[in-house]
Amino acid sequence: MRAETVRTIARREYLARVTTKGFWIATVTLPLLMAAMVFLPSLVLLKAKATHRMAVVDETGELGAALVEALAPEPGPRREARDLEALGERQTEEQTARFVVELVAPGEPEAQRAALDARVLAGEIDSWIRLGAGQLAGGKVEYRAASVSNFLTQKRLEGALSRVVSRARLEGAGLDAARVSELTRATELDTVRVSERGSRAEGGMAGFFLAYFLFFLLYMVVAIYGQQVLNGVLEEKTTRVVEVLLATVRPVELMLGKLAGIGLVGLTQLGIWLATAVALTAPGVVGAMAWLPEGKMPQVAPGVVVHFLLLFLLGYFFFATLYAAIGAASNNLQEAQQFAGVVVIFLVAPVLLMMPVINDPDSVLAVVVSLIPPFTPLLMMLRIAVKMPPAWQVALGYLLSGGFTLLLVWLCARIYRVGILMHGKKPSLAELWRWLRYA
Amino acid sequence: MEPTLELDAVRKTFGDFVAVDSVSFAVPKGSLFGLLGPNGAGKTTTIRMVMDILAPDRGEVRLFGRPRSRGDLRRIGYLPEERGLYRRMTVADQLVFLGELQGVPRREAGRRAEHWLERLELGAWAKAKVEALSKGMQQKIQIAGTLLHEPDLLILDEPFSGLDPINQGVLKEVLSELRGRGTTILFSTHIMEHAEKLCDRICLISGGRVVLEGELAALKRARGGNVYRLFADGSLDGLESVPGVTQVVRKGDGEARLLLGPEADPAAVLAALVDRTRVREYRSEEPDLETLFIQAVRDAS
């Protein structure tokens, strides 16, 4: 076997794909989507951060002033603002408009309602509320605005109102203001992910989303590039290019060159995607997004990226080799799809096993299935993303899956060699077995 | 001198069907060799066995005076019967790729590709994608692809099929030119006229067996005595029944070639012909390939 020949073939396969528009459209679209997911919410929220002008008709004479204070922006760094009602509200505050409250002395109810509604319609104020004299006893507050869909703003107003009212009630019950403030201190969850590389703050769902994202990305690229190998082999076979090539090239050189070239295309695309993901989720970038609570974004660590790329290569070679043999043994795409349907089971089974593995990545089931060679690339990736498995399990996974794939390459090369020049009827399993043994 | 290519009793069967049966021939160095025969005679199977694409069941293929090796295959330029190019690749890239596979450095392959595209009148298409080209053009590109590594032996399976007369002419010129530079050429065809003027040696196969093999001129000389050309104004029907005539090859309006049996007396045949039709001309001539072929097939069966 000549390395030079394999390289020439791989180079052609690579350039033939990387120079197409479709490749770059796909390559650029995913990072754009990722960037959109990170940046768009902040753009939307920036717009929502405009001031919200609200008139408050205060019949109680005390709640109005307290509400103005409660709605004022929290002083000091965010992380120290612990005494808010709840984490959710803190987020709400960060993400909603700044309130500009205008206290209005109570007047004749009907006339005042008409006057304030008119001001809302004229756009002078965004909303108005009336705090009735009986508010402390309970009852709803009427929120009147031209738009009632800004639920984050409303939620925050609601939170501030409840707090103001409950404090007033407690004070009414005889507690002093300092005691009330102490008693109404909020409790919030601060989620910290524990891993061997040290703990870091992370949203509770973040780890799940990262694992989910990496799993399906891997699934997608292995399936797509495996299919590309199938199509490429079939194209060479049906256009009969292969007969020209085989005059100077050995079948195994052709097959390996094709696998290497298309695999490199996959690595190129993944490299661009993952580099974008690492950059977008880097602490610096996340920190710059004022709206993103620190540590809520799943971070794509470079170590995970390395595992991802290695597992991509393993999974790719496993499926692409099978697809190459299938392409060579078939006469057309329909025939090939029938064979490929069987192979796809190895790709779909890990999807079915995904939830149990995510829920308990160290269970016996998860360990066993992630060490079954065809499943290792996808399921080991899942486990690594959720919680780094013991090093020996990762190493064993690579070893078993790598060895199995090498064996498969050897077997498939034998089928490929015979099948690629065989035209006519679809081979039976017995014939495929004969091809394997044909020296 | 060692022949460039030698087949010794090569046999290939597909199931019960014997495609090639103990075929032997030798292609001397520097010759232009025609592998002739009707459709399905076994020409392509024979060539595929030479190229190690099919393994013979029996017999041996010798290249350059020794048993065939992979390395020797790289000294061959091969045009398969089924044409194939990457459809979405440009013509120039495709040729450079083929050249590189044959061991030519990329830059040099580019230079030679340019030369051959010019020579085959395709210079303007170098940057075009293959799928934009006509079948004839694709065929010329593929022929160019067989020449980039300056092979010692050129094996072309049906190189003329699909080419218009002008391009057939261009190809004949190129083949003569290459032969002048010492390249050994073997090509197959089922159209005898293509081999008639080009080849110095031929091998005729039919039904998987060699029916005639050797130097073309010598073959013609050896068989010349039995062929007569007849021009007549009347009907040429039923001449097969004339005693001594074994076969009639109709050539067109009022013209036929008559093959006479080895014992036949040409004068007696003429006398019989005059009785049946109005003979204008009757003369002995060198047989053309088609006549030789028909004669050989008849003798073989």
Image (cartoon, coloured by chain):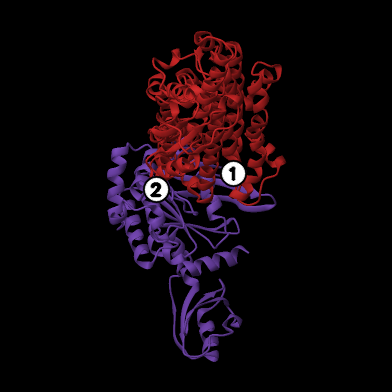
Chain A representation colour: red
Vertical order, A398 against A19 (above or below): above
Residue A267: quadrant of the picture: top left
Residue named by callout 2: B89
Residue named by callout 1: B56
Question: Could you tell me if residue A297 is visible in this image?
Answer: no
Q: Nearer the viewer, residue A283 or A221?
A: A283
Which mark's residue is nearer the viewer, 1 or 2?
Answer: 2
Vertical order, A349 against A391 (above or below): below
Three-letter amino acid code of the residue under disc 1: Pro
Chain B representation colour: purple
Q: Earlier in the sequence, mark 1 or mark 2?
A: 1
* Point 45% across, 19% down: residue: A294
Circle 1 Cα neighbour tier, 10 Å, few/some/many (<14 / 14–19 / ≥20): many
Q: Position of residue A415 (x, y in %)?
A: 61, 37
Using the image, name the chain to which the residue with label 1 belongs: B
Work out whether disc 1 and disc 2 sit on a shared chain.
Answer: yes
> Which type of secondary structure does the marked residue at label 1 adopt?
loop
Three-letter amino acid code of the residue under disc 2: Met
Taking the view exactly as shown, the residue that stands out farthest to the right is A430
Using the image, name the chain to which the residue with label 2 belongs: B
User: Mark 2 and mark 1 in contact (Cβ < 8 Å)?
Assistant: no
Vertical order, A85 against B18 (above or below): above
Q: Position of residue A3 (x, y in %)?
A: 43, 29
* Point 49% across, 54% down: residue: B81
* Point 33% across, 51% down: residue: B178
